[in-house]
Image (cartoon, rainbow, N blue to C red):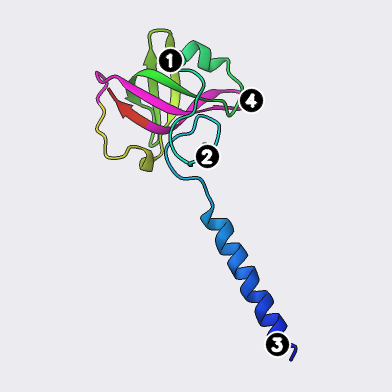
Amino acid sequence: MKTLPLALAGILFSVLLATTSIAQPTGGFTGGKSTPGGGGFSGSANRATTVVEALSMPDDTRTSLRGSIESRIDREHYLFRDNTGTITVEIDDDEWGGVAIAPTDVVVLYGEIDRDMFSVEFDVKQIIKQ
């Protein structure tokens, strides 16, 4: 008789665990807020942040940059430039989405500021070629 309550408790735990892992937000970059439907951009500003502005933002601030990727620094780091300056951007392999970018292309990068004690870089979550 003791095995039935334990089996039911195990099933209940499994159901709760499965529902929790399914209820993750879906969709594109959310600009720092979760949207009720789970998709789309909900950032407050319609214009891209400049590099100069980005360099002074706090860690984990979500924003966008518009300009060009000038060169590759290493496997996942690139030099990004707009008309106000340059910043190192980190682009994971899975964020490219099959898009080929040349230094002459204008892109909008969505992501967040990654600040540590000695440097500031931009962690890219989405790339849009214009």
Residue at mark 1: 47
Q: Earlier in the sequence, mark 1 or mark 3?
A: 3
SS category of the residue bearing label 3: helix
Report x, y in % for residue 130.
27, 22
Residue at image location 38% in from the left, 18% down from the top: 66
- Which mark is drawn over residue 36? 2
Query: Mark number for residue 3?
Result: 3
Q: CA distance from mark 2 to mark 3?
A: 41 Å
Residue type at mark 2: give it: Pro
Boundaries of the magenta span: 102-126
Q: Are marks 4 and 3 in contact (CB under 8 Å)?
A: no
Q: Which residue is mark 4?
A: 117
Q: Amino acid at mark 3?
A: Thr
Give me the C-alpha separation between circle 2 and circle 1.
23 Å
- Residue type (three-letter) at the residue carrying disc 4: Met
Secondary structure at badge 2 equals loop
Q: Point out the image quarter for the N terminus.
A: bottom right
Q: Residue at x 40, y 34 (%)?
A: 91
